Amino acid sequence: MAHVLLAAALAMVAAAATGSASPAEGIQPLSKIAMNKATVNLHGSAYVRATPALLGDQEEDTVWVTVKYGWENPSADDWIAVFSPADFISGSCPNPSRYPGEPLLCTAPIKYQYANYSANYLYGGKGAIRFQLINQRSDFSFALFTGGLENPALVTVSKQVAFKNPKAPVFPRLAQGKTHDEMAVTWTSGYDIGEAYPFVEWGVVASGGNPTRTPAGTLTFTRGSMCGEPARTVGWRDPGFIHTAFMRGLWPNKEYLYKIGHELSDGTVVWGRSYTFRAPPTPGQNSLQRIIVFGDMGKAERDGSNEFANYQPGSLNTTDKLVEDLDNYDIVFHIGDLPYANGYLSQWDQFTAQVAPISANKPYMVASGNHERDWPNTGGFFDVKDSGGECGVPAETMYYYPAENRANFWYKVDYGMFRFCVADSEHDWREGTPQYKFIEECLSTVDRKHQPWLIFAAHRVLGYSSNSWYADQGSFEEPEGRESLQKLWQRHRVDIAFFGHVHNYERTCPLYQSQCVTSERSNYSGTMNGTIFVVAGGGGSHLSGYTSATPKWSVFRDKDYGFTKLTAFNHSSLLFEYKKSSDGKVYDSFTIHRDYRDVLGCVHDSCFPTTLAT
């Protein structure tokens, strides 16, 4: 009997380990290239030519390049790779020990496309493809490979092309600071602090006064900061320098104009573009406040490269809908799994470029997901390799978030009538841990008279999901998720708990201890006696299925790409909407109407014992 129990326990542990990543796991397209097997077999008849050679001559940070290519032995598995830096063949490579003696190239490409994407390539041996490039601090070259992705042989390489100023500051990312009157802006450039002084110039729109200049701090990281392959090997690419400046003393709801820049040693300034943002409301302020929440978006390529891998097919739809609707929301929460770079560092630049039209104008708050953080023996809660060796370093450096310790990816945001408690599901959240103490303090210190809408958010499902993988394990949650946290959610009356990780949409009834506390499904009012749990993981990555049987607590399920929106009209009226990325229309919604006394009213496990005094 003991042997049977041991075997069952081991099976459960194995299932937990293999199932820690989201179901229907996708494969990072760049990881399909066997760079360790690449050989150099140059042919005189082959050519690759790229135009224009000078990129961004009008200060653009995104351009289209036409690549023409051909040779006398065309094959269906030939492919064109984009490399940056251009001299990818030269230099020493940190060869993994398991590939001794093999001609490992130093780096994976930043993107690729099959040569026969050009219709006439197989018949005439000539083709042309357009690639979209972003300013990534270095030059580019284009290479023709034969032998497919499994046995790549380099046939020829183009001359380099480069941006006019590859070091220029690009792709700003706004984030609310630790107080409501503070906005952080983070951006990337090729300038170290010894070359140029980074700053942000900002002021109230149309104020007529002199703008303020605020200096920025500068961070970067090295190959040695990475925890494993491919981030330390073929996936490595220099991240440049990441700068963050803080605009403080903001007037609530005022519109501000800002511009990032670098002052060179001769006094000249290299400027980025100008953008605007609206300052956050004060905590408790009664005004229209609109919040976007989603997870698991990833990145995709507008030029069609890498797309045959179907890695994040809905990513651009979600991005484009949010850009189109930019005037109709105030702040964004992307709750984990950002670019799914999985150790290919070039993808972080491409992701910041993709979401820049959003993040340059709205606070873009991020959470840590398994594809940002997880790597064995690095202090995370899940001992898996989902980050591709990044172990959280790029996410913690590329984006600002108001945590006390950036390595502990948990923080709170007060936005008008909302308080958001953003947890880190990749670190231990159980009772007695530092994160549990943070969650308890975040939930317990909010003044519900003035901030009635209390929101919890984390990447993995610590609440409820009828995803098929969870159902197979009989859990509907991460192990020890809601068991550790549900009394906190109940005691402090959390309105909604948001999760990603599962790539679909699902909404529950107000719940406590797996039981619906009301039969109402769309209009909630009166005493608050449970939390609504929402999975909003359909941001763009491959979709996840559900269990065949629908649990009683599951109110609405949709296996599609989308995002959610919260609209607080005042202290007593909240609207929740789920919108599809394909058309931006609302497919599920509910309202909450209640007064302060409805939050105070005691229900099961929400109040401490009381006495009657005489």
Image (cartoon, rainbow, N blue to C red):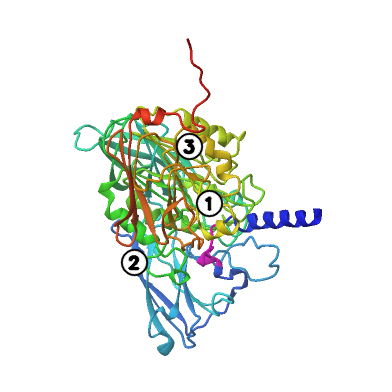
Distance of label 1 from label 2 (alpha carbons): 29 Å
Where is residue 339? Give x, y as percent.
46, 56
The residue type indicated by label 2 comes to: Trp
Q: Check disc 3: other Cα within 10 Å, few if <14, some if 14-19, many if 20+.
A: many
Which residue matches tag 1?
372
The part of the image, by quadrant, that contains residue 520 is: top left
| Residue 61 visible | no
Q: Secondary structure at mark 1?
A: helix
Where is residue 184? Give x, y as percent.
39, 38
The residue type indicated by label 1 comes to: Glu
Residue 28 counted in the magenta span: yes
Q: Which mark is residue 411?
A: 3
Q: Check disc 1: other Cα within 10 Å, few if <14, some if 14-19, many if 20+.
A: many
Q: Residue at x 45, y 29 (%)?
A: 602
Q: Secondary structure at mark 2?
A: strand
The part of the image, by quadrant, that contains residue 266 is: top left
Left or right of residue 605: residue 452 = left
Tally the numbered discs: 3
Sequence-first tag of 2 and 3: 2
Q: Is the N terminus in the top left, top right, bottom left or bottom right quadrant?
A: bottom right
Where is residue 497? Give x, y as percent.
45, 43
